[in-house]
Image (tube, rainbow, N blue to C red):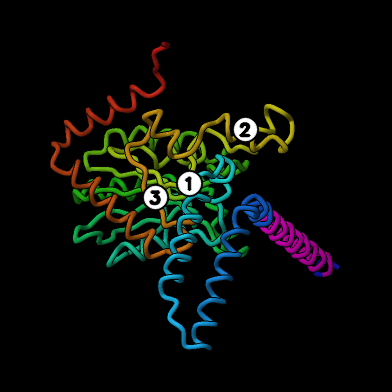
Amino acid sequence: MKFKLQEDLIKSEIDHKDQQIKALDELILQEENNFNEALGKMALEQKELEDKLIEMRKLALENNVDVTAAVESLTDKILELKKETFSNLTRWQRVQLSRHPDRPYTLKYIHLMCDKFIELHGDRNVKDDKAMVGGFAELGGQTVMMIGQQKGSNTKARQLRNFGMANPEGYRKALRLMKLAEKFNKPVVCLIDTPGAFPGLEAEERGQGEAIARNIYEMIRLKVPIIICIIGEGASGGALGIGVGDKTLMMENTWYTVISPESCSSILWRSWDKKELAAEQLKLTANDMKGFGLIDEIVPEPVGGAHWSYTEAAAILKQNIITALQSVKDIAPATRTEIRIEKYSKMGFWEEA
């Protein structure tokens, strides 16, 4: 009887997990459809041109006709249209682009940018948080400590990585790695891509707020150079937990703010329906952040977004990180810390016209 009850409980739990996975898959599919619909009209004209280009090449091969000039003209038109399409995206469309399921995540960038990467695990207290990854790597000929949130590329991986939402042990693991980098006098590079810190009961019981606050405090005082780059979503304290540094970079189609547009809409209008308006009001894009002086540089992406060319996106990001490191590496540690403190102390102040 006892074993039968246990078996029933296990089956019930498996069914519940299956339902959760199915619901998550449907939600992801819906987000993809919404994004595709938003860009549908603009993409239609581009698709027509691409079809015309394919047809022209086919006819040229069949009839042995030289259409090089026409092909080049059409190719240029497609590229121009693509640039125009993605340079005029709304803030909400950029939020959706930052969540594109094919967009490269932290580990993909690390493997494409670095010649060597040795991943380190655990916070030496609770467990290894799979949502936070890090380790020593060779970047542009120098050893650095790479740290970042990692999302999954499919439903099972997303569950394993907790959708990039780190627990307190994830932030303590990140701090342990930063202290290790400081011990060996190696720069720290943080790649941010998170919808926020995990808000579960167990995370709060283990001190989520304290872990993030401790990281901010320690990162301000760290003696080695720190470069921050937002490569996807940069939401709230989850981003700030590894987001204090000498230089802050932000990729073109990413966002960085205190709350997601959906959550903001839910609080202000009691519904997700106003998420587009919330995104506009939050002013969360790279251009907005640069205007506010909250970031230092915008990192351009391949036309259409980072998911169109992983290697190109990684090469651009790598060059920007190396340039940022070069600009701060020769500053004395005490001076660098003072500049960092002054930089963050100024944030939030403004003068009315």
Q: Position of residue 261 (x, y in %)?
A: 61, 37
Image depth: mark 3 or mark 2 in front:
2
**Mark 1 / mark 2, whichever is N-terminal:** 1
Against 113, is 259 above or below?
above
Quarter of the image containing the N terminus?
bottom right
Quarter of the image containing the C terminus?
top left
Query: What is the CA distance from the residue labelled 3 to the residue labelled 2?
Result: 25 Å
**Mark 3 / mark 2, whichever is N-terminal:** 3
Q: Which residue was labeled with disc 3?
A: 191
Mark 1 lies on a secondary structure that is helix
Q: Residues within 10 Å of mark 2 (few under 14, many from 20)?
A: many
Image depth: mark 1 or mark 2 in front:
1
Q: How many marks?
A: 3
Q: Position of residue 165 (x, y in %)?
A: 54, 48
Mark 3 lies on a secondary structure that is strand
Left/right placement of residue 210 relative to residue 217 reads right
Amino acid at the residue labelled 3: Leu
Q: Position of residue 172 (x, y in %)?
A: 41, 45
| Residue at x 28% of width, y 43% of height | 226
Amino acid at the residue labelled 2: Ala
Left/right placement of residue 142 relative to residue 219 reads left
**Mark 3 / mark 1, whichever is N-terminal:** 1
- Is there CB contact under 8 Å for labels 1 and 2? no
Q: Quadrant of residue 224?
A: top left
User: Disc number at residue 278?
Assistant: 2
Image depth: mark 3 or mark 1 in front:
1
Q: Which residue was labeled with disc 1?
A: 87
